[in-house]
Image (spheres, rainbow, N blue to C red):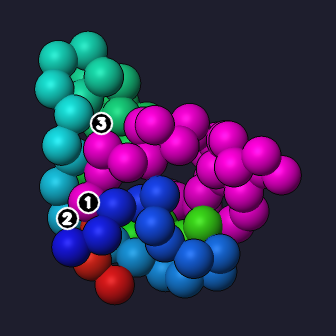
């Protein structure tokens, strides 16, 4: 499996699992990144951080360190 960080721009993926634990997992889940959520990478900042994604009819920017904690299928 690959992580959200590995997804290419414009590639639709589905969240398979959140690897983070504790407060970080809670924050990721509270942002709507739960199992089965369809996500598309919109753009990546010039230095690679943050990553802008589209999910549930809104755009969200997350750090690439957080994106590495989200396993995706697709």
| Quadrant, the C terminus | bottom left
Q: Which mark is residue 29?
A: 3
Q: Which mark is residue 47?
A: none
Q: Are marks 3 and 1 in contact (CB under 8 Å)?
A: no
Instruction: Tell me which label, 3 or 1, sits earlier in the chain.
Output: 3
Residue 36: tell me if it is visible.
no
What percent of the width, then of the height, locates residue 49? 67, 41
- The mark lying in front, picked from 3 and 1, is 1
Q: Which mark is residue 16?
A: 2
Q: Secondary structure at mark 2?
A: strand
Residue 36 sits in which quadrant? Answer: bottom left
Residue under the point 30% across and 36% down:
29
Tell me if residue 45 comes above or below residue 10 in the rendering: above
* Callout 1 crowding tier (Cα within 10 Å): few <14, some 14–19, many ≥20: many
| Mark pair 3, 2: CA separation | 12 Å
Instruction: Tell me which label, 2 or 1, sits earlier in the chain.
Output: 2
Q: Secondary structure at mark 3?
A: helix
Q: Are marks 2 and 1 in contact (CB under 8 Å)?
A: yes
Instruction: Tell me which label, 3 or 2, sits earlier in the chain.
Output: 2
Observer-nearest of 4 and 39:
4
Q: Which mark is residue 71?
A: 1
Tell me if residue 33 comes above or below residue 56 in the rendering: above
Observer-nearest of 47 and 58:
47
Tell me if residue 60 comes above or below residue 39 in the rendering: above
Residue under the point 67% across and 41% down:
50
| Magenta-highlighted residues | 42-71
What percent of the width, then of the height, locates residue 33? 35, 48
């Amino acid at each position: 499996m690959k992580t959200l960080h590995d997804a290419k721009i414009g590639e639709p993926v589905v969240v398979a699992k959140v690897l983070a634990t504790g407060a970080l997992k809670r924050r990721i889940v509270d942002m709507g990144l739960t199992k089965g959520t369809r996500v598309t990478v919109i753009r990546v900042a010039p230095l690679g951080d943050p990553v802008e994604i589209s999910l549930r009819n809104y755009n969200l920017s997350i750090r690439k360190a957080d994106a590495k904690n989200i396993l995706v299928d697709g």
